[in-house]
Amino acid sequence: MTSQTLVKKLGLTDVKKFNDFLYLTKPTITLLVVITSFPSIVIGSGGFPDGFILLATFLGTALVSSSAAVFNQVFEEDLDLNMLRTQSRSLPSGRLTAKEAFWFGLILGGLGLGTLYFATTPLAAAIALCGHLFYIFIYTLWLKKRTPQNIVIGGMAGAVGPLIGWAAVSGDLAWPAWVLFFIITLWTPPHFWALALKYKEDYKKAGIPMYPVVHGDHKTRRAMMLYSLALIPFVLSLYAFGKAGLLYALVGSTFAIKFAWDSIRIFRSRTNDQVMPFFHFSCAYTFAIFGALALDSLIFN
């Protein structure tokens, strides 16, 4: 089957259907995974990396992350159909079939892993594969429907970007990559629980034991605060141990402290009025932290 035949078979020549396939990849999440790999690539390279390796790492990471997002929606089609927030997605709305999505996800994953394996390092491909399988089988098919700690453990799958980036340029893993991994891992629960507070009834209706559904709003707001506070030493450790400069220290401390302070305000307010502004700021938080680290490393190292 030629590439042109495949494109026609999937219906990618139809603009609307192309958009439906695109949205299956959760572009915002995929972009986040790619961006979080960049500082590791820069630091692991000791400066600006080889252009080919950089592009191959970005492409491979994006394709594997997109594949995981597609399979997540294939296996959660029934849940998405029962939630107001997700009913309009490509699969529950009927605009795409599960079979189409399955093959799309399989192709993306195969291309992504092949790109990482042959154009970067086998270790980078292995980490990407582990993250992919963890997200699908551990988080989507097991944790999400069984425990309120689902996003705490499952969030690690979305934190593999720095590990992939470091492994792609060095062929090994060092402690700065693991620090970045844990920054994303600790950031994920307060980020996602803010959304879960907003759509708690949706999750309850779908039978998903998200933290607010099981433990209530007050305990969720407290947990968000604790995770946000725990982030601060991890963010600052890169500067403290000489792996980042003053630019990163200023940006990182500013955003980390604001993130923690906002979570404290939400906890003390005893309402959910500010959870969505907190959610939106949390997105900017990761882009700022990782962007500042990459820029700092490029300018001063």
Image: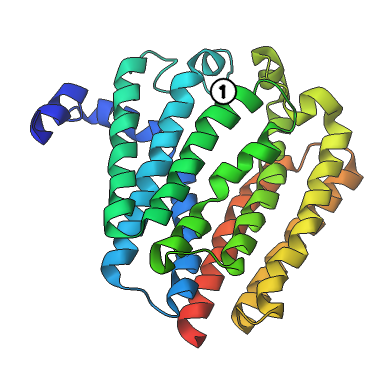
Of 143 and 38, nearer the camera is: 143
The residue positioned 52% from the left and 67% from the top of the image is 291
Determine which quarter of the picture holds residue 200. top right
Can I make out residue 88 in this image?
A: no
What is the count of numbered marks? 1
Element at label 1: helix
Residue 211 seen in the figure:
yes
Label 1 sits on what residue type? Answer: Leu
Quadrant in which residue 145 is drawn? top right
Which residue does the image show at 88% across and 35% down from the upper left?
218
As displayed, is residue 55 above or below residue 3?
A: below
Residue 221 spot, x, y in % from top left: 83, 40
Q: Residue furthest bottom?
A: 300
Relative to 108, does residue 50 appear above or below in the rendering?
below
Tell me residue 64's x, y (percent): 39, 42
Q: Which residue is mark 1?
A: 141
Q: Is residue 90 left or right of residue 258?
A: left
The residue drawn where x is 56% and y is 27% is: 140
Residue found at x 53% / y 79%: 296
Q: Position of residue 112 (x, y in %)?
A: 32, 45
Dividing the image into 4 quarters, which one contains the N terminus? Answer: top left
In the rendered structure, the answer to whether residue 207 lies left or right of residue 168 reads right
**Image quadrant assignment for residue 85:** top right
Query: Crowding at label 1, few (<14), some or many (≥20) Cα neighbours within 10 Å?
Result: some
- The spot of residue 273 in percent (x, y) is 78, 38
In this view, the residue in front, 121 or 186, is 121
Q: Is residue 92 left or right of residue 192?
A: left
